[in-house]
Image: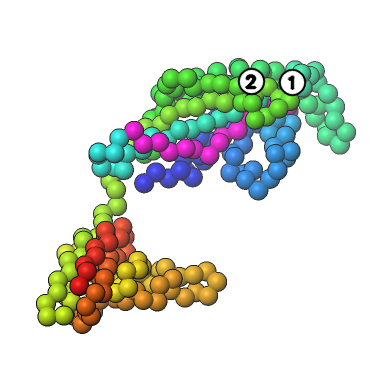
Amino acid sequence: MIDLIQLQDDLYGILMSAPQLAPVNIVQERAFLVKSNLEKDVIWQTARNGRTGNGLLIEIPKILCDSDGVSGPPQQVELSFVSFQNGDAAFIPPTTIPGQATPVIGGGLFAEQVEQFLVDILHLLNIGGVGSLRVAGQFSSPARDYPGVNARRTRILMTPRQTAQTARVALPIISLSNGTCTIICGTVGAVVYYTLDGSFPSNPSVALTPSSNTAINANSKPYTAPFSVAGGQLIRAAGYLAGYNLSLVVKYQN
């Protein structure tokens, strides 16, 4: 799996460490999830290294899939960034702000320049253990969702390092003989849960409702020994084991 949190933190560290972006306030969108749009003004209004008027937002990544026939699971990560220029404020001369000893000066960059620095830094960059970044197709456009400020959205694709999908518990096998049901599973240590009413065979040790801490399906039972089945009952079963994905759900109509 891709550690998207670590990826965003690494991007933040890379961009904050770039000398070209020293006058640009850089933030992660995750920090603003509980804030209003008005409060996002602090992105370009907050001074960094004595400079103000420029900002760069690292947005939450999107996940794309361009192939469904290979293991992996196959994923492409779409990284997006918004570069900001707060009008002429990005070019103000040294200005003393009440209560602040050091004068503030504009960052001196247009949003287009911030974007170009961003692309120059990240294109063909390989983040160790995560994946490689590249610019492709139409990667830049005006960010119209920030009225009153010059903003541009940049999209950069990342091809993750191939990772194996978590192993899945083997499909349980249901067999009936003279009204008695037997279930076996090929994954050693797996616990099979089953239902007789057609409902989903959830794992009651994990699948608990938050309010009452009770199992979401009281009819889901662990298989421990062969059991009797009445005519017309629908058996559904799934295997579970810590560290594995649950098995596919198998069903058998008596």
Q: If the image is split into quadrants, where does the C terminus sit?
A: bottom left
The quadrant holding residue 173 is: bottom left
Name the residue at 32% across, 76% down: 221
Closest to the observer, 78 or 114: 78
Q: Position of residue 100 (x, y in %)?
A: 83, 34
Q: Which mark is residue 87?
A: 1
Asked if the residues shown at circle 2 and circle 1 are in contact, with their CB atoms under 8 angstroms apart, the answer is no
Where does the image place residue 183, in percent across and percent down from the top left? 18, 72
Q: Is residue 252 visible?
A: yes
Q: Secondary structure at mark 2?
A: helix
Q: Which residue is mark 2?
A: 111
State the CA–CA distance, disc 2 to disc 1. 9 Å
Determine which quarter of the picture holds residue 77: top left
Q: Amino acid at mark 1?
A: Gly
Q: Secondary structure at mark 1?
A: helix
Q: Is residue 20 magenta?
A: no
Query: Compared to 146, does 247 lie above or below?
Result: below
Q: Residue furthest right?
A: 98
Identified by mark 2, the residue type is Ala
Camera sees residue 42? no
Q: Residue 203 location, x and y as percent?
A: 36, 69
What's the residue at 47%, 19% (across, down)?
138
Is 237 drawn above or below residue 102 in the view shown?
Answer: below
Does residue 154 appear to the left or right of 185 in the view shown? right
